[in-house]
Amino acid sequence: MATVGWQGITLKVPADWSLVGVSGDAKKGYLRVDGTIGSALEVRWSPVLGKAPELVVKAREFLATLEKSSRKSRTKFSSKIREEDGGSVGFTWRGERLGQGRLIHCERCDRVLIAQVISSPEENVSHLAPAILGSIADHRDDGRVNWALYGLDFTVPEGYRIEKHSLMSGFLSLTFKNGLRSLVVERWGLAETLLEGCSIDEWYRKDAVPDIKGYRLVFTDNEVMGHDGLKVEGRRGGVKQAVRAAAYSLTLHEYPSFLTGYAWLCKDSNRLLGVRATHAAGEQIAEEVRDSIRCH
């Protein structure tokens, strides 16, 4: 089993299942993980508006929507709902496909989650569904938020919101923002091919540095997470930046005048990984996120 996580919501799925779709934000969104044939995991979350929701009622509404679709295709539809311990509701349904799901209301996150594992009658992954649905978690208790996709697991501090992402087979990049602070987590596949004929320093200057604007950078060879790597340090300068910093200080927050980044080669997985963050003096954002990554 492997972890899939988006917006702090994590589940355990078979290691050969892949995240194929995400949308929305931390309040309201959707993710889909596809299995190797026709099976899939779907997770939807939405904010609670007003009083605490009645999960059984919501389950009925969700199943009624599925049944309506089945009637259009003239497919027989049946379903069951059961209340579970811990304030959640489980359900199963059978139509053209099979489904097994779970509804959860998290009072802390103030969200309702609907997750379901679906498959064809011929494939039938109902034996996997309890483990997948039972692994749902939507928050941590240490002020950090989980993210996990394609084997890249890491955490970011609360307050950072994803701004953009690129999810390709050979390259993952997630950019987060917290006010003027930025955080970028990246992973490249086929590291031996990327580094052919050049050092990590040379590769990073060519591949990543063009995306870094406004900082005077210093590069140092550095062991990172037990691997050969690189440390990047930068600082903004000039009159314009001094004026912006002075203006930002009026908000009682320090201006993120510094940049710290790390890149390293994990030979075990044949991947290159990178983390960089802009921050105020004394902050250790890049180090905190770096230390949370499992690279192999």
Image (cartoon, rainbow, N blue to C red):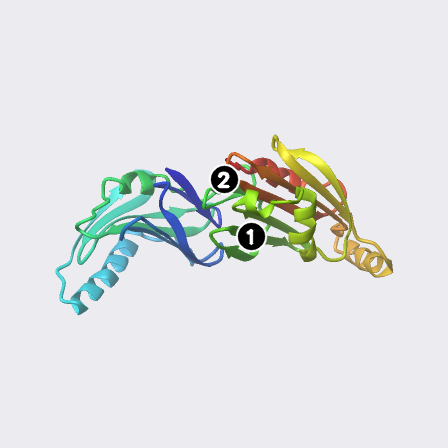
Foreground residue among 281 and 107 = 281
Q: CA distance from mark 1 to mark 2?
A: 23 Å
Structural crowding at the residue carrying mark 2, measured as other residues with C-alpha within 10 Å and reported as few (<14), some (14–19) or many (≥20): few
The local secondary structure at tag 1 comes to strand
Q: Earlier in the sequence, mark 1 or mark 2?
A: 2
- Considering every residue shown, the one lying at the far right of the view is 239
Type of amino acid under label 1: Ser
Residue 86 or 25: which is nearer the viewer? 25
Q: Which residue is mark 2?
A: 140
Q: Residue furthest front?
A: 197
Q: Residue at x 69, y 44 (%)?
A: 201
Residue 267, quarter of picture: top right
Q: The residue under label 2 is which amino acid type? A: Arg
Residue that carries the numbered disc 1 in the rendered image:
173
Nearer to me, 154 or 100:
154
Q: Is residue 160 in sight in this rendering?
A: yes
Q: Quadrant of residue 271?
A: top right
Which of the two marks, 1 or 2, is nearer to us in this view?
Answer: 1
Q: Residue at x 53, y 51 (%)?
A: 172
- The answer to whether residue 103 is left or right of residue 171 is left
Q: Quadrant of the N terminus?
A: top left
State the image coordinates of residue 36 (x, y, percent, origin top left): 31, 48
The residue sitting at 64% across, 45% down in the picture is 197
- Where residue 141 appears, as percent x and y from the top left, is 51, 37
Q: Residue furthest bottom?
A: 72
Up-down relation of residue 76 to residue 277 (above or below): below
Q: Does residue 183 sit above or below 270 in this rendering?
A: below
Please tell me whether residue 38 is drawn above or below residue 286 in the rendered image.
Answer: below
**Would you say residue 261 is visible in this rendering?**
no
Relative to 13, is 227 above or below? above
At horizontal 20% and vertical 46% (from top left) the residue drawn is: 124
Q: Give coordinates of residue 42: x percent, y percent.
A: 34, 53
